[in-house]
Image: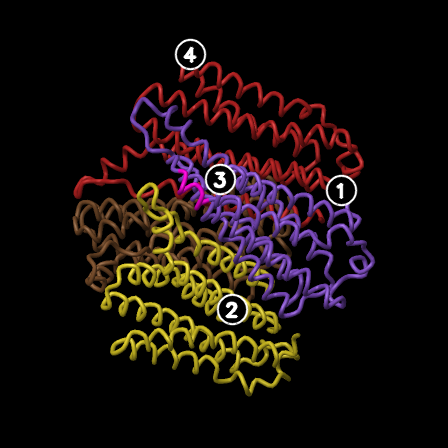
Chain colours: A brown, B yellow, C purple, D red
């Protein structure tokens, strides 16, 4: 298994996933003559789609830069990658849950949906944590550029994002808006983590 | 992030998007024995699909030639590209709105659907405008061929198409058919813009 | 636009199309305890899927060998290719029509569905005919291998398959089973055409 | 047809298939305020998705290593590959059947669904058996590395997995849980077969 093959397959999964997310965003049920009202009520799915698109997009940027900087791929890295892609494909489900429950305006359901989103996000970050640990123990997989890079800033990034998602889960139990804030903070933090990585690797 | 990777990912998103547009074009509900009547009533979705297919196809041709002519990609260009792909994935939604509302023959709904299509198209052209501005300010990203090319004809293309879509939005408020004409003119203009670019880059 | 890019994009569209065809093949509506009966009644969609899968698969093999043998691509060839891909994406629709109408066992509807399938197939073959004519008039686009190849056997293949589809359309009007036979003959003939091309290009 | 093209197309089909499997995993029907109960009832689809994802993922790893080790591709290998991809695209259907029937808790339907899954899996393994036989008779298609590799351990792998699926089918007729165990054993065995192949080819 060459690195290029793994990247091509992963790019394919990311490209498909990011495109099928939009399939949730369909023509609403509406009474003839009242389309606009029905469309306005769709704001939750639009917001959920925007957030999820940029979430998956950031993960792709990160995944890409990271694997690009590896020198070679072994079998275990391949399996870790399959697990990572698995966790990311799940994001479609809680995205739709969040949109649907906000539309129905039931606080209990919204809580469940946010927790589901945070659990999947926690799972995704967990697979990145596994990736970091594995490559940390196998420096021979890294390119020279990566070995010499200063990862002091990004070392704890997966743990930070995992903590944010744990906080999102716990706080959702008591106060849904606080849970939502932690969830968004976690997603936003991925972009920070991407910048850390990208800077450490000296990319512009 | 190499240029080839960005192009492969973007080609993937374009290929998927252009193929899933057709998923809207499904077997109609029909009374047994009256399939033909039901199929004929589907003309709006066929027309909307044809227009949208060639719209996305033209955007792909354009996107491709443009990025092919760049020398390198930086992080911001990557983000602009993700925003551009985001805007293009949205086209499925107003395409389905236009088809559904024309089927129901309610003028108010048709107006909303055309405006929605024009708003998304305006957003798409806006991202191309951002792309033009960014590469204009960073000539080092351009290949030599692109730096020497005469872009005098295509300089204002994103602004022209944005103007057509603004006209489509405004005129739809008063006279839906006029809005439709401006919308089609805007979509058709993308092909002109592609020819401008392609000629400037000296491609056959 | 390089040839490789066009091929990668087209391969992407073929891969997506051939995979989403299977989405029509879903869990049937069934009364609990009577799944088997419901599954057996799905034979039309299974048959339609098998035929369409090998139809699109053959088109992909053909498309691939043909473009592989071209030396370069110009803008018009790009547009012909987009038109060809457009025609092929439409195949999902009549495939579902045929399956649905056979399930309902209404002869009039089945006739319409077969005619729709043949019309799309005729359109697809028509785009291949345009491709043949265009490259025939522009021998500079062909590789040396292709210029020296003996295409005497495959020269009329698009016209033969178009004739078969015209016969399928006409005979469906009078006798549906005869129309079905011509339709299957047309689809089967694509494989013969692929062998002609492949042999002419000296491929094993 | 070059080997790289075949691999790119196949990778595309695998990437799409593995991503659309998740489309079965959608927001459940639920009474407002009772989302959690409805989600918990979805466990069968989650389990079916997890199993099928790793099944297809393993097949991709295997397919990839195998074709990577071939030196060249001929027309028949191309057709065998199309047949193999066809068989794999079918997996979506029994996956959904298994999930749906377990949800409804009717033993007869569950039996049918497990048998359907095992039949498709048997078909898939059958295409791998055809692949093994074909390349066995055409050693010129193999790379030097592959010709010298010791395949004594993996020689009978397709036959072993086919036997497991036959056992799954037969035992499902009498005792559904036993059928399920053989089915899972068969799917798990693919990973063993992948390790055999990967070790024989000397990959880490």
Q: Nearer the viewer, mark 1 or mark 3?
A: 3
In the picture as drawn, the residue positioned furthest to the front comes out as C174
Q: Nearer the viewer, residue D25 or B6?
A: D25
Whether residue A3 can be seen here: no
Q: Residue at x 73, y 51 (%)?
A: C154
Residue stretch in magenta = C107-113
> Where is residue D16 shown, x and y percent of the image?
50, 46
Distance from Cα at disc 3 to Cα at disc 2: 40 Å
Q: Is residue B118 left or right of residue C73?
A: left
Count neighbours of disc 3 (C-alpha within 10 A) and say few if under 14, some if 14 to 19, many if 20 or more: many
Q: Nearer the viewer, mark 4 or mark 3?
A: 3
Which chain contains the residue that carries disc 3? C
Element assignment for label 1: loop
> Where is residue C195 shown, x and y percent of the image?
72, 45
Mark number, residue D174:
4
Mark number, residue B58:
2
Q: Quickly name the residue at label 1.
A: D71
Q: Quickly name the residue at label 3.
A: C176
Count neighbours of disc 4 (C-alpha within 10 A) and say few if under 14, some if 14 to 19, many if 20 or more: few
Count neighbours of disc 1 (C-alpha within 10 A) and say few if under 14, some if 14 to 19, many if 20 or more: some
């Amino acid at each position: 298994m060459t690195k290029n093959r793994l990247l091509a397959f992963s790019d394919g999964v990311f490209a498909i996933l990011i495109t099928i997310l939009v399939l949730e965003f369909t023509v609403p049920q509406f009474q003839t003559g009242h389309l606009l009202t029905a469309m306005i009520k769709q704001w939750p799915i639009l917001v959920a789609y925007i957030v999820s698109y940029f979430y998956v997009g950031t993960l792709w940027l990160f995944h890409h830069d990271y694997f690009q900087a590896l020198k070679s791929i072994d079998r275990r890295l391949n399996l870790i990658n399959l697990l990572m892609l698995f966790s990311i494909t799940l994001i479609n489900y809680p995205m739709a849950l969040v949109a649907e429950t906000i539309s129905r305006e039931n606080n209990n359901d919204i809580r469940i949906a946010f927790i589901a989103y945070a659990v999947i996000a926690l799972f995704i970050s967990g697979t990145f944590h596994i990736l970091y640990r594995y490559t940390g123990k196998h420096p021979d997989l890294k390119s020279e550029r990566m070995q010499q890079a200063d990862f002091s800033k990004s070392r704890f990034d997966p743990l930070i994002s995992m903590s944010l998602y744990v906080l999102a889960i716990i706080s959702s139990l008591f106060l849904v808006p606080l849970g939502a804030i932690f969830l968004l903070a976690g997603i936003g933090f991925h972009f920070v983590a991407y910048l850390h990585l990208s800077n450490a690797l000296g990319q512009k």
